[in-house]
Amino acid sequence: MPLVMRLRTASRSRSHARTAISVGVDHVRDEDGALLIELIVTAALLVVVILGTFSAFDGASASSSTIKNRALAAGIAQQDQERLRTFKSTDLSNYRETRTQVVAGVPYTVVSRADWVVDSTGGTSCGPAGANAQANYVEITSTVTWPVMRNVQPVVQKSYVAPPNGSFGANQGSLCVQVIDGSNAPLPGLTVSTTGAGTYSDVTDTGGSTFFGYIPTGNYTVTVGSSCIDENGNSPPTKQVSVVGATTTTLTVLCAQPAQITGVTFDTKPFINSVLPLQLGATVASRNKWGFSIGHPSLPAPAFRKFTEAQSMSGGAITGLNGPFATPNNIFPFSSPYSIWAGNCLAMKPSANGTDPDPTVLATAGGSVSPAAALHQPALNVLAISSVPLATPVVGARVRVTPSQPEMNGCAGTISLGNTNIRGELDEPGLPYGTYDVCVDKPPVALSFTVSKVKVNKWPGTNLIQFPLVAGVASPSVCP
C-alpha cells in the first residue's frame, strides 16, 4: 500500500477514536445529570414525608395538650363554682374578680362574677319584668382561660343561688340600667359605672342592660364609658338617679354617634307699598333675629335646644347675619325627625301660633344634614308716616320689637329691625312666629308710637301696619 494511503487510513482511525471517546464522555455526563435530578427529587420527597410526620406528631401532641388543659380548666371552674357558693348573699351581690391559678406549670386565668337575674326572664333585662319586680336569683359564672388556646373556647360554668329571705335590708335597693341608641336598639359591651352612694362598674349584656343588685339606697351618678353622646349632646352620657330601698329602679341611657345640622338660613316675603293696591314682594334672605331651635318629644324638658342666638340690639343696627348657620356636632340622632324653626323659644314655633306647620329635619348618626328649605320668618310690615290721613312716609324711623307677655312666655329681649326706607317701610321685616310689642320712633325727636300684641303668626306676614309719628298722637318717649 502506498505511503500516502497508509497515512490517510491512520488519520481516519485516530479521528474515529476521538469521536468515540467524546460520545462516551457525553453519555457519562448525561447519566450524571439525570442522577443528580433523581437525588434532588428524592430528597425533596423525603423532606415532605418527614415534615408531615413531625406535623402529625405535633398535632397529636397539641391535641393531647389541649385536652389536658381543658380538663384541668374544667376542674378549676368547678372549684370556683363551689367557692362562690360558700359566699354570703350580701358578699356575692355584684361580685367581680379576676385571678390567676397555676396548675402543672400552666397559668390559668379565672374570671368570677355574679349577676342578679329575674325569675320570670332568667336574665338581667331592664324590660317590664325587670322593672316591676326585684331580682330573684344570683347567677354565678366561672370562666377559665389559659395560654396558647388556639381556636379552643374558654371553659365556662354557671349555676344559680337563691338568697335566703331577709338577706338584704330595707336600706338596700337595686338599679337596672339599659343603654340604647336613637332607634331604641340595645347596646351591648359598654361599661356602665356609678358614683355617689356606692361605686360600681359593669358591662352591658346582649340586651344592653346591666343590673346592680341590692346596693345602698341613695343618689347615684350613672356614666356610660363611651365616645357617644346622650340626648342633650353630652359625652360621655351621664344621668342622675335615686335608688329606693326594697325596689328596683330602672334607668334608660341614650348613647349614639353625634350628628350635625348645617346650612340653616332664614327667609321672608315683605309687602311692597310702592304701587296700590299692596303688592307682595319676592322672597328675600332674612337676617338672624333670635337664632333657631330644634325640638323633639324625646328631649328632656322643655323638649328643645336653641342655637345661634342673636343678642338684643340698640341704635340702628340690624341684628345678626344671613347665615348659613350650623349646630355644634353634638345632635342626638333620633329615629324620627326634629322640628326646626326660627327663634329661641317654644312660643316662636309656627305650630304654636297658627296653622303653619313646623319644618323638620332628620339627623343621622355620624352625618351632617341640612333643612330642605330656609326657615320662614314672616314679615312685620311696618309703615311709618308723619301725617294722617294723607300718609307721608318717614325715612329713617327706628323699629324695635319685644316679645309680648304672657303670650311669649320664655322668650325675651328687644331686637332692632333697622330703619325705614324711602317708602317708610322695612327692607327686611322678617321675624320668628309670635306676638310682639312694636315700637317705632325717629330720634332725636322724643316721639314714638307703640302697637302692642301684634300677631306675626302666618306666612308670608302681617298686613301693612301704620305707625303715625305725629305730635299729640305718639307717646312722649323713645323706644327701648
Image (cartoon, helix red, strand yellow):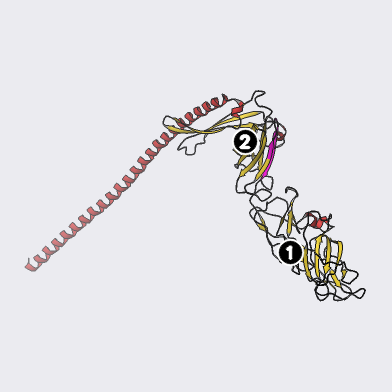
- Mark 1 or 2 closer to N-term? 2
**For residue 52, above or below residue 23:** above
Mark 2 Cα within 10 Å, few/some/many (few <14, many 20+)? few
Please name the residue that numbered disc 1 is placed on.
288
Question: Is 467 or 39 nearer to us in this picture?
Answer: 467
Question: Is 52 or 85 nearer to us in this picture?
Answer: 85
Instruction: Where is residue 449? Give x, y as percent.
Output: 86, 67
| Residue 211: numbered disc | none
Which secondary structure lies at badge 2? Answer: loop
Q: In the figure, residue 117 lies in which quadrant? A: top right
Question: Is 346 or 317 nearer to us in this picture?
Answer: 317
Q: Is 242 colored magenta in this rendering?
A: yes
Q: Is 452 colored magenta in this rendering?
A: no
Which secondary structure lies at badge 1? Answer: loop
Instruction: Name which residue type carries label 2.
Output: Gly
Residue 357 in sight in this render: no
The quarter of the picture where the C terminus appears is bottom right
Please name the residue that numbered disc 2 is placed on.
198
> Is 3 on the left-hand or right-hand side of 198?
left
> Is 122 on the left-hand or right-hand side of 304?
left
Q: In the figure, residue 470 lies in which quadrant? A: bottom right
**For residue 441, above or below residue 46:** below
Instruction: Name which residue type carries label 1.
Output: Asn
Q: In the figure, residue 434 lies in which quadrant? A: bottom right
> Is 468 on the left-hand or right-hand side of 144?
right
Q: How many marks?
A: 2
Question: Is 68 or 251 nearer to us in this picture?
Answer: 251
Give the extent of the magenta segment: 241-255
The quarter of the picture where the N terminus appears is bottom left
